[in-house]
Image (cartoon, helix red, strand yellow):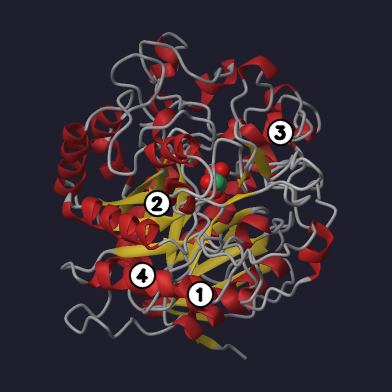
Amino acid sequence: MSVIEQSSSPTTNHAVDPAPWWRQAVVYQIYPRSFADANGDGLGDIPGITSKADYLQGLGIDAVWLSPFYPSELADGGYDVADYRNVDPRLGTLGDFDEMVDALHDRDIKVVVDIVPNHTSDQHAWFQEALAAGRGSAARQRYIFREGTGQDGSQPPTDWESIFGGPAWEQVADGQWYLHNFAVEQPDLNWACPEVRADFVKTLHFWSDRGVDGFRIDVAHMLTKDLTEPLPSSAELRLIPMDGQHPMVDRDDVHDVYAEWRLVFNSYDPPRTAVAEAWVDKARVPRYASPEGLGQAFNFDLLQADFDADQFENVVRENLQLARVSGSSSTWVLSNHDVTRHATRYGLPHPPREPNGLPAIKHGLEWILSGGESPELDRHSGERRARAATLFMLGLPGSSYLYQGEELGLHEVADIPDSARQDPTFFRSGGVDLGRDGCRVPLPWTESPDTAFGFGEGGSHLPQPDWFSGYAASGQDCDTGSSLSLYRRALQLRRALQTGEQLEWIDSGRADVLRFRRPNGWEVVTNFGTEPYELDRADVLVSTREVTDGTLPGESTAWLASDPV
Ligand code: BGC
């Protein structure tokens, strides 16, 4: 029996626009420092993005999301923001930003920017002021400063560990300690301070006034904290339930912040959008995604699933249900700037696991020796599966987030020399965790290694491997069998096919084959196994491997439609 799943109905808070653009958008994530370098200094920049506006339009995306491009010391790839209302001079100017927005808007591409509200850079004027102003000052109230423990206060206030490894407290010259849940250079802000709240509202207006269409909210679940003394030990902290009252994570009161932001978003026409990066218990995700809150939340479940029919089906069922609860549409992600690229994940013999059983998305690069050339990695199977998973994802109702370079079928770069690594997770884990640099290597635009494979005249800030040549956009441009051509075709078809948000499962007759139907007879069939699967229809619109005589090969996806598109 087939069951029709309605993702949810479009939000009703904007009666004039029954289906806001973001509900079923394809959003392409740009990591600006590694996308395209127009001024030849080895770092990607804003004019570089503008220079690729035609490429982005040709790809067929609806929006770009830019990871931070703000002034930053780059202690965490730009997620250590020194000034929220400016552009890093190495990446351009506010004028360049405006030109980029115009170029993208002219091509019907929306612009989403990253807001990093949990912490600033230690170079931010506020933090510098807090250091100079000393204990007890109003400037220190914007951050989380505490006295140390031990006889002379030389021990940190607690034994908490930062998410990037190592202690979560750092001592300053006058003896006080400040909290940093990430790198030392990323002091946590104090969201109980009205000035902090007011300043972010100002930032949201600043970018909205410049024409930005939406925001991606970094670490959205950790802003508010209850650090009333006595502070729990890390062992005690782990035992506190995540029920909205946890001292540090996913507190109910964080939604007061987002309710205020919603008023800002809705004061624009069209309303600005937002998507939460919130690593919280599933049952608590809908609140972030509600129309009174940020409006949408990331779901990272596909990104954590193996290439497996059962796992994919469960992820889809569960997340469409959550979208029904929030009234939002779901989001789907296979790769981003924090995880090993999915072509590589799927090419590993069996995905490395964290001690908690989750796939080692941030770790485990030790598996991929010598830049993916190791016998451990089946590069071809990884690519076949990646294409199949991508076409499956693009067939789902909701919005899909793509990460720069995945359209080229790029693998992770694993063999970056230690001396060239940049990610704080590498350093703070003493090199145990190879970190996230491998998915942040500048893109290969052309086949020749001169000009850093077309990235820019000034080389590349992370070393590019020789094998990038075979993945260059230029080589794939006119090749109808390339990954790039597949993405272009799929995105073009998706625009034509995407209507309602319903999904109806169809019994495929095989445990390793998933099949579902969307409105107007659009069908998506994914063969997760290796045995070919007989389609009972011949009207294939696009497929990741060739369908001959109605036979869908293993590790592939096909889209079918009764009506010509
Ligand atoms: C971002 C990371 C960043 C961290 C701290 C995240 O979740 O995606 O890249 O390191 O927040 O800002």
Q: Which label's residue is closer to the chain start, 3 or 4?
A: 4
The label shown at residue 44 is none
- Secondary element under disc 4, as helix, strand or loop, is helix
* Viewer-nearest residue: 271 or 315: 271
Residue at point 24% right, 33% down? Answer: 50
Numbered disc 3: secondary structure: helix
Residue receiving disc 2: 115
Tag 3: amino acid: Arg
User: Closer to the camera: disc 3 or disc 4?
Assistant: 3
Disc number lying in front (2 or 4):
2
Dot placed on the residue nearer the N-terminal end, 3 or 1? 1
Q: Point out residue 202 in the picture as x, y percentages from the top left corner.
A: 26, 56
In the rendered view, does 233 fall on the left or right side of 28?
right
Disc 1 + disc 4, Cβ < 8 Å: no
Q: x and y percent of residue 10 in the render? A: 33, 81
Q: Residues within 10 Å of mark 3 (few under 14, many from 20)?
A: many
Residue marked by disc 4: 23
The three-letter amino acid code for the residue at tag 2 is Ile
| Disc 1 element | loop
Residue reaching furthest to the top: 450
Q: Residue at x 74, y 39 (%)?
A: 166
Name the residue beneath numbered marker 3.
Answer: 428
